[in-house]
């Protein structure tokens, strides 16, 4: 019989661009990492900070 499966828990952030509403994801990231810098949208190139963190 095979060894047990292993599960890894990671933090994912789903980001929506304020300019084009494009969507992208960031993995293994902390709240501080999200809010301490500007981010560039990979779809339209708009650069801005994360304004709202929604926890669901």
Image (cartoon, rainbow, N blue to C red):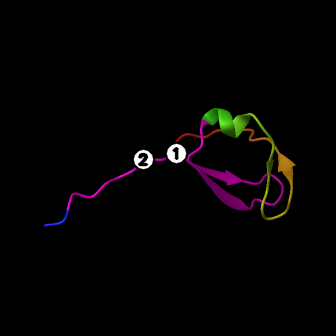
Front residue (pair 34, 21): 34
The correct choice, above or below, for 33 with respect to 16 in the image is above
> What span is colored magenta in the figure?
3-30
Residue at 52%, 45% (x, y): give it.
11
- What residue do we see at 75% from left, 38% from top? 51
Q: CA distance from mark 2 to mark 1?
A: 7 Å
Contact check, label 2 and label 1, Cβ < 8 Å:
no
Crowd tier of the residue under label 2, counting other residues whose Cα lies within 10 Å: few below 14, some 14–19, many 20 or above: few
Name the residue rendered at 20%, 60% in the picture.
3
In this view, 36 is above or below 56: above
Residue 19, x across and y down, in percent: 84, 55
Quarter assignment of residue 34: top right
Instruction: Kindly state the secondary structure of the residue where label 2 is placed.
Output: loop
In front of the other: 26 or 51: 26
Check residue 9 in the rendering and tell me which mark sits there, or answer none.
2
**Closer-to-camera residue (23/3):** 3
Say left or right for 28 vs 19. Answer: left
Question: Which label sits on residue 34?
Answer: none
Given the current orientation, which residue lies at the most extreme left position? 1
- Element class at badge 1: loop
Residue drawn at the location 62% of the way across and 35% of the way down? 31
Asked which quadrant contains residue 36, the reply is top right
Q: The N terminus appears in which quarter of the rendering?
A: bottom left
Q: Residue 45's spot in the image, x, y percent?
A: 86, 59
Q: Main secondary structure of the magenta part?
A: loop
Q: Which mark is residue 11?
A: 1
* Residue 42 sits inside the magenta stretch: no
User: Residue 27: where, in percent of width, then height?
Assistant: 58, 51
Q: Residues within 10 Å of mark 1 (few under 14, many from 20)?
A: few
**In magenta segment, residue 8:** yes
Where is residue 21 shown, x and y percent of the image? 76, 59
Q: How many marks?
A: 2
């Amino acid at each position: 019989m095979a060894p047990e499966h292993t599960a890894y828990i990671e933090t994912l952030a789903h980001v929506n661009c304020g300019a084009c509403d494009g969507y992208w994801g960031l993995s293994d990231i902390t709240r501080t990492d999200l809010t301490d810098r500007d981010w560039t949208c990979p779809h339209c190139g708009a650069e801005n900070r994360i304004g709202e963190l929604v926890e669901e």
